[in-house]
Image: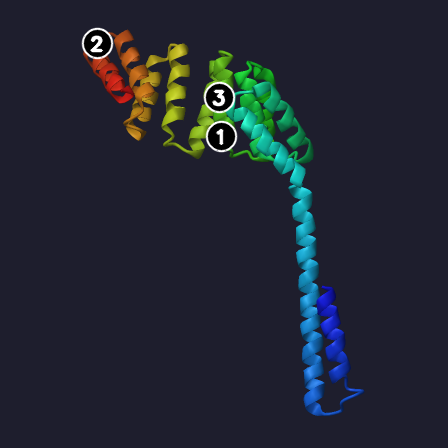
């Protein structure tokens, strides 16, 4: 900006109407003034945007998140949680950090704390399929199957072709002994992802339980082939 100001002063001295009275120089002076004001305003906007970006994404928060991700990848969940905490203190609306923290807590069997994280994400982003899905998994791990189904339903409204969620939905229904509905869920899981071995295996076991031996055996054989 200092270089722009210096160049502007130099040109003003050269073309100012008090020094040059020609019509051509007067037009030139106005063009120089307009150009300067445009550049100055652009600089203000860029400076304001840069400041805002820095406020939203401090450099140390980005570094902390990277460290947390490395710890998460190494399955050092306790340590990762501490770093995600620091990130969310600086960026309280950063949903990725809340999701990861919740995932760490779930892996540590700290399910109630994990649910708080997923609910925090859903306050910020009510249509987060990941948050509904992870919340459902967490509730399922706690054997709160009816609540888990509610979460999976929310996720499936957002993406009705998500095979993994249909499979998880089927597992919850199976545990509630709602076998016909569970079978429908496994059917959808294998329909949307024909190579989904776990869904075929779950479907096969359910069919065996329903004494549909031939169909169940075929599904389990298919699952074994996909796992090879």
Contact (Cβ within 8 Å) of mark 2 with mark 1: no
**Residue located farthest toward the right when viewing the structure as drawn:** 18
| Whole-number angstrom distance, CA of label 1 to CA of label 3 | 10 Å
Q: Is residue 49 left or right of residue 144?
A: right
Q: Is residue 155 above or below residue 179?
A: below
Q: Residue at x 31, y 29 (%)?
A: 193
Identify the element where label 3 is drawn. helix
Of pointers 2 and 1, the one earlier in the residue sequence:
1
- How many discs appear? 3
- Along the polypeptide, which appears first: circle 1 or circle 3? 1
Q: Is residue 85 above or below residue 46?
A: above
Q: Is residue 53 above or below residue 197?
A: below
Query: Which of pointers 2 and 3 lies earlier in the amino acid sequence?
Result: 3
Report the disc number at residue 136. 3
- What SS does tag 1 mark? helix
Disc 1 target residue: 130
The residue that mark 2 highlights is: 213
**Relative image position of residue 123 (x, y in whole percent):** 60, 31
Answer above or below: position of 12 versus 39: below
Residue for point 28% across, 26% down: 195
Which corner quadrant holds the N terminus?
bottom right
Q: Is label 2 or label 1 in front?
A: 1
Q: Position of residue 42 (x, y in %)?
A: 66, 63
The foreground one among 58 and 202 is 58
**Residue 197 drawn at (x, y percent):** 30, 21
Type of colouring: rainbow
Query: Which residue is pictured at 61% across the width and 28% down the height?
Result: 120
In which quarter of the view is residue 83 placed? top right
Query: What residue is shown at x 27% (from left), y 27% (from top)?
Result: 194
């Amino acid at each position: 900006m200092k270089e722009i100001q210096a160049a502007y002063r130099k040109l003003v001295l050269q073309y100012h109407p008090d020094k040059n009275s020609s019509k051509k120089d007067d037009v030139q002076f106005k063009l120089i003034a307009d150009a300067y004001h445009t550049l100055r305003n652009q600089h203000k906007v860029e400076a304001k945007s840069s400041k805002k970006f820095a406020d939203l994404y401090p450099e140390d928060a980005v570094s902390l998140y990277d460290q947390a991700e490395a710890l998460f990848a190494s399955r050092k969940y306790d340590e990762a949680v501490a770093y995600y905490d620091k990130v969310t203190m600086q960026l309280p609306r950063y949903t990725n950090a809340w999701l990861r923290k919740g995932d760490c807590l779930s892996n540590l069997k700290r399910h109630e704390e994990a649910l708080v994280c997923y609910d925090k994400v859903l306050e910020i982003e009510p249509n987060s399929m990941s948050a509904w899905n992870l919340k459902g998994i967490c509730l399922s791990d706690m054997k709160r199957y009816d609540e888990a189904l509610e979460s999976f339903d929310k996720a499936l409204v957002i993406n009705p072709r998500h095979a993994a969620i249909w499979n998880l939905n089927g597992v919850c229904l199976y545990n509630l002994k709602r076998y016909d509905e569970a079978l429908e869920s496994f059917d959808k899981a294998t329909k949307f992802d024909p190579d989904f071995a776990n869904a075929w295996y779950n479907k096969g076991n359910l069919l065996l339980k329903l004494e549909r031996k031939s169909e169940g055996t075929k599904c389990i054989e298919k699952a074994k082939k996909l796992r090879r």
